[in-house]
Amino acid sequence: MTLDPEDLAKITALTLAHYEENAESFEAGTRDHDVSQNISALLRHIQGEPPYDILDLGCGPGRDLKTFAALGHRPVGLDGTASFVEMARAASGCEVWHQDFLQLALPPERFDGIFANAVLFHVPGQELPQVLRALRATLKPGGVLFSSNPRGTNQEGWNRGRYGVYHDLEGWQELLTAAGFEALEHYYRPTGLPRDQQPWLASVWRRPG
C-alpha cells in the first residue's frame, strides 16, 4: 500500500491531534517512567568528552530533556505537538523546536547523539528511509542514534487514535543499515522479563565517522 500526500497529511494531523487533546494526561502518565537504561545506552556509546549536544526527538513534555540537562549535556528538544513544545520549554528551560517528523529541517552535523524514545514508530514505513537519512545527516560523524519502539511483525496502521508501525528486529536492522547506520547494540524492555512480556525493542546505532 502506497500512501499519497493526502494520506500522510491525515496521519500527521490525527496523530498530533490525539496528543494535543491528551497532553496533560500524557504528561502525568509518563512523568515517572524510568528510561534511565535507554539514556545510559545512548550516552555510553558517544565518543569524545562530554558535555554532548543531544537531540531529544519527540521530546514530549520534556521529561528527558530535564534529565540530559541535569547531567550537564546540551539537549535540544523537537516535537510536532504544540502543547508539548510549550510544556517542554517550560519544564526544562531548553531550546525546543516545533517540527513535523515528515518534514524535518535539521542542521547538518550538529549533534553528538539523538534520543528517539518511543517516537519513530509513528513514522509511516514508506517515509522512514528519508527520516532516517535526515537524522543521520544531523549527527556528527561518529554520532549515535538511540531508538526504542513498540515491536511487532512489521504491521502498520491506526491504534487508539494514533498511527504506528510495529517493527521486528530484522526489519528495523534492514532499515537502519540501508540509511547508513552501523549497529552497536539492541535489547528488549522491560528488562528481566520473558520475551513475550517485553513489548519494547531498543537499539543503538552509529553514523560512521
Image: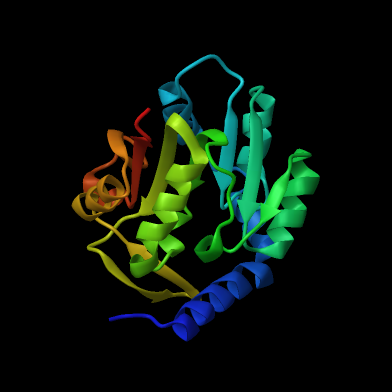
Give the colouring mode of the picture: rainbow
Residue at image position (59%, 55%) is: 105
Front residue of 203/209: it is 209
Across and down, in percent, residue 21 comes to: 67, 72
Task: Please name the residue shown 54% across and 73% down the image.
Answer: 12
Q: Residue 173: image x %, image y %? A: 24, 47
Q: Quadrant of residue 14?
A: bottom right
Residue that protrudes farthest toward the front in the picture: 108
Against 152, residue 70 (above or below) is above
Is residue 24 shown to the viewer in this render?
A: no
Where does residue 160 sit, x and y in percent of width and height?
A: 47, 75
Picture layout, residue 68 above or below residue 48: below
Left or right: 90 with respect to 4? right
Depth check: give the residue in front, 197 or 58: 58
- Quarter of the image for the N terminus: give it: bottom left
Pinpoint residue 65: horizontal percent, then vertical percent.
Answer: 65, 39
